[in-house]
Image (cartoon, rainbow, N blue to C red):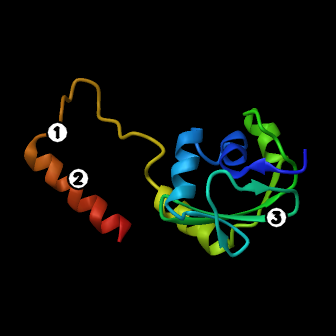
Amino acid sequence: MTKVRIDKWLWSVRIFKSRTLASEACKSGKVRIGEQGVKPSVGVSVGEKVFVKKGGFYLEFLVKKLIEKRVGAALAQECYDNLTPQEELDKYKDWFIGKAGSEQRERGAGRPTKRERREIDEYKEAWFE
């Protein structure tokens, strides 16, 4: 196997959750191999650089291994090198802050009132600016 469809490869190494999403990204011009925009049926081979725009972030990968079947995350990471620039990774980390855990209230306190909600929103705006 010297080439694999780009949509299949992106799905199998877990860049996209479904092959349909990978195909749509290719069709809308969000996936490039080198400097060339690609269709979903274009083949990718080992050693090529793949550029993906996903969720407002620009990701860059070097293809190390070709696979057609979806594999676990540990095996998928062996199939590419992540060449995404550090400033893009930092942008992702800045975006992700505060989204991992949910907020907690004391047991029995119930939902926040409208006034408490406004205070919470003001606090968050001041903290994350």
Q: Is residue 45 above or below residue 7?
A: below
Q: Position of residue 86 (x, y in %)?
A: 67, 72
Tell me the kind of residue under disc 3: Glu
Is there CB contact under 8 Å for labels 2 and 1?
yes
Looking at the image, is 18 positioned above or below residue 25? Answer: above
Q: Label 2, secondary structure: give it.
A: helix
Q: Residue at x 60, y 70 (%)?
A: 88
Instruction: Please name which of the two marks, 3 or 1, marks the residue nearer to the observer.
Output: 3
Instruction: Name the image quarter holding residue 110.
Output: top left
Disc 1: CA contacts within 10 A as few (<14), some (14-19) or many (>=20): few
Residue toward you, 52 or 97: 52
Q: Residue furthest top?
A: 108
Q: Which residue is mark 1?
A: 112
Q: Please state, as top left, top right, bottom left or bottom right, where the C terminus lies in the image.
A: bottom left
Q: In this image, 63 relative to 112: left or right?
A: right
Binning the other alpha carbons within 10 Å of mark 2 as few (below 14), some (14 to 19) or many (20 upward) gives few
- The vertical placement of 43 against 125, above or below, is above
Instruction: Name the spot of residue 113 as percent of width and height, x first.
Output: 11, 40
Which residue shows up at 69% across the image and 43% down it? Answer: 8
> Which amino acid, mark 2?
Ile
Quadrant of the rendered structure where residue 42 is?
Answer: bottom right
Q: Is residue 58 left or right of residue 41?
A: left
* Upstream in sequence: badge 3 or badge 1: 3
Instruction: Identify the amino acid type marked 1.
Output: Pro
Label 1 SS: loop
Q: Identify the residue position indicated by label 2 in the image.
A: 120
Pointer 3 with pointer 1, Cβ within 8 A: no
Report, in whole angstroms, how far the alpha carbon at label 3 lies from the one at label 2. 48 Å
Between the C-alphas of marks 3 and 1, the distance is: 52 Å
- The disc, 2 or 1, on the residue closer to the chain's N-terminal end is 1
Residue at screen point 50% across, 64% down: 94
Residue 47 in the image: x percent, y percent?
Answer: 87, 63
